[in-house]
Image (cartoon, rainbow, N blue to C red):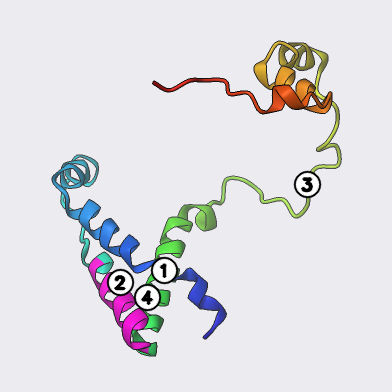
């Protein structure tokens, strides 16, 4: 078993992705965005290979699923890797943690998050366990 096995999703996820990809709603969306239907067969192959790996410990099936996941990841990040507009940083800016401007601090003081954080730091145990909404 290699490190790459963490890339493999639960087999049912591949089946759900295939079903979603071939649904009428998805086909309409694909036609609207791309002008044609998208090929969903890779999701089906991934599901079948995942089942072969899970049930039969077929190492070739595992390799195919891992390769498919790596290809999918590279395709998703293609825009990031091909970006030549922005210069990528090697380290954060020197003043990345400087205090917020006074205007933003004043705006923050009027938020729920500010008051809730203040309550929690004051350690009021009876207030920490109350619910904020009721479902009926």
Q: Crowdedness of circle 4 by 10 Å Cα count: few (<14), some, many (20+)?
A: many
Tell me how far mark 3 sits from mark 2, CA to CA.
39 Å
13 on left or right of 27: right
Determine which residue is flagged by label 2: 46
x%, y% of residue 86? 61, 45
Say if mark 1 contacts mark 2, CB within 8 Å. yes
Determine which residue is flagged by label 3: 92
Determine which residue is flagged by label 4: 65
Tell me how far mark 3 sits from mark 4, CA to CA.
36 Å
Q: Residue at x 57, y 20 (%)?
A: 132
Q: Earlier in the sequence, mark 3 or mark 1?
A: 1
Q: Would residue 48 be counted in the magenta stretch?
A: yes
Tell me how far mark 1 sits from mark 2, CA to CA.
9 Å
Magenta residues, as a range?
A: 44-58
Tell me how far mark 4 sits from mark 1, CA to CA.
6 Å
Q: Is residue 117 visible?
A: no
């Amino acid at each position: 078993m290699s490190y790459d096995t963490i890339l493999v999703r639960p087999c049912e996820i591949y089946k759900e992705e295939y079903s979603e990809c071939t649904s009428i709603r998805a086909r309409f969306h694909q036609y609207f965005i791309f002008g044609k239907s998208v090929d969903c067969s890779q999701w089906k192959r991934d599901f079948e290979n995942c089942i072969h790996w899970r049930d039969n410990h077929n190492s070739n099936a595992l390799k195919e699923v891992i390769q498919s996941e790596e290809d999918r990841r590279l395709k998703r990040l293609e825009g990031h890797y091909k970006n030549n507009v922005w210069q990528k940083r090697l380290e954060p800016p020197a003043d990345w943690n400087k205090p917020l401007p006074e205007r933003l601090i004043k705006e923050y003081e009027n938020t729920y998050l500010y008051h809730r954080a203040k309550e929690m730091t004051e350690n009021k145990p009876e207030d920490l366990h109350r619910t904020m909404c009721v479902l009926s």
